[in-house]
Image: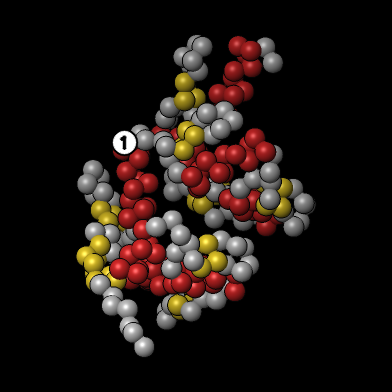
Amino acid sequence: MEQTEEITNNCEVYGNITTNQNIKIHTPEKLFQCEVCKKEFGVSGSLNRHMMIHTGEKPFKCEVCNTSFSRRGDLKRHMSIHTGEKPFQCEVCDKSFSRNEVLNRHMRSHTGEKPFQCEVCSKRFVSSAKSNQHMKVHTGEKPFQCEVCNKSFSRRGHLIRHMMIHTGEKPFNCEVCYKRLCDSRNLYLHMRIHTGEKPIKCEVCNKMFRAPGSLNRHMTIHTGE
């Protein structure tokens, strides 16, 4: 039987590959289809990796904590948690990160870049996660429910803080007066009592306040509400 000669090309994207492979990658033809969701792929390897979404298969296991992953790259990134390795360093403030994408998000704190915009109110955010979280303000979605009193919250962190009402837990301790508080934000605001800091200004009369809640209550004087 006559054999078709495979010619090796030096692809600018993938390096040395055969002509047949090159055609499959760079043409819009997608030969491999997922039988579950009908998504199509140009190469069989991409389909095989995709199928793990449906099968739940996670063949790459962390030898330290036994957490499993569907992709080798995810396991590699996870391992930095155990090794403490943070090879990606911010050139502005020298803070280091375990992943490049986290460094990229951090850099926006220096550049002021907010590439994600709310389609409802046009407010901008530094990350898609922050934008998605914000959308719950408009949708009214509150997927996190307290199992004790059934109160619902839009964010998991709010539910965790709320649960301390039921447990009585106050894990944050003021080092000045030893008052205990239920979350780090309350401790942060409480510390302004000792420092005298009042960074929040009323735009109407220029009076300064320690906390946003104090400003909101004060604003009723001007609004008459």
Q: Nearer the viewer, residue 148 or 93?
A: 93
> Which residue sits at x=62%, y=23%?
217
Q: Nearer the viewer, residue 26 or 88?
A: 26
Specify the farthest residue to the front: 2
Specify the farthest residue to the right: 149
The residue carrying pointer 1 sits among few (fewer than 14), some (14 to 19) or many (20 or more) residues within 10 Å by Cα, namely few
Amino acid residing under circle 1: Thr
- Colour logic: secondary structure
Question: In this orientation, does residue 165 appear?
Answer: no
> Which residue sits at x=72%, y=47%?
152
- For residue 66, side relative to residue 22 (left or right): right
Q: Nearer the viewer, residue 187 or 108?
A: 108
> Which residue sits at x=27%, y=56%?
88
Give the structural element (helix, strand or loop) at label 1.
Answer: helix
> Which residue sits at x=44%, y=27%?
198
Quadrant containing the C terminus in the rendered view: top right
Residue picked out by circle 1: 111
Residue 131: image location, x then y, percent: 52, 41
- For residue 33, side relative to residue 60 (left or right): right
Quadrant assignment, res 148: bottom right
- For residue 199, side relative to residue 223 (left or right): left
Residue 153: image location, x then y, percent: 67, 46
Is 2 placed above or below 126 here? below
